[in-house]
Image: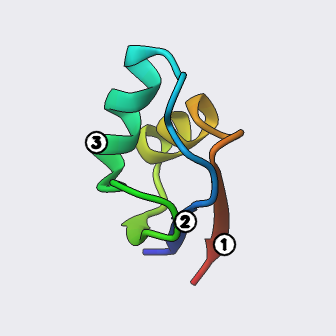
């Protein structure tokens, strides 16, 4: 199955609590953290919620 790489590029300071929880669920704790996830609808939905804080790249 395809995978995507999610990288946090902006801080979560000042974000809503649900956005901070979404970053935590993606495994991102600080700027420049990178995690690889399976490319599925659940992960894409989480990325869409914090699209202003992360970059996404196909692996």
Q: Mark 2 points at which residue?
A: 7
Left or right of 5, for residue 27: left
Contact (CB < 8 A) between labels 2 and 1? Answer: yes
Where residue 53 appears, x then y in whole percent? 63, 44
N-terminal-most mark, 3 or 2: 2
Where residue 49 appears, x then y in whole percent? 58, 29
Left or right of 55, for residue 41: left
Packing grade of label 2 (10 A; few <14, some 14-19, many >=20) is many
Q: Please tell me which residue is depicted at 58% across the width and 35% down the height of the picture.
A: 50
Of helix, strand and loop, which one carries label 2? Answer: strand
Q: Which colour scheme is used?
A: rainbow
Where residue 28 appears, x then y in whole percent? 36, 55
Of helix, strand and loop, which one carries label 1? Answer: strand
Q: Mark 3 points at which residue?
A: 25
Q: Please tell me which residue is depicted at 43% across the width and 74% down the height of the picture.
A: 1
N-terminal-most mark, 3 or 1: 3
Quote the CA–CA distance across marks 2 and 1: 8 Å
Packing grade of label 1 (10 A; few <14, some 14-19, many >=20) is few
N-terminal-most mark, 2 or 1: 2
Q: Nearer the viewer, mark 2 or mark 1?
A: 2
Quadrant assignment, res 20: top left
Q: Name the residue under label 1.
A: 57
């Amino acid at each position: 199955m395809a995978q995507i790489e999610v990288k946090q590029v902006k801080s979560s300071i000042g974000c809503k609590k649900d956005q901070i929880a979404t970053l935590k669920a993606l495994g991102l704790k600080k700027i420049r953290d990178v995690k690889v996830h399976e490319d599925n609808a659940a992960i894409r939905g989480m990325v869409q919620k914090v699209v202003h804080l992360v970059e996404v790249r196909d692996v």
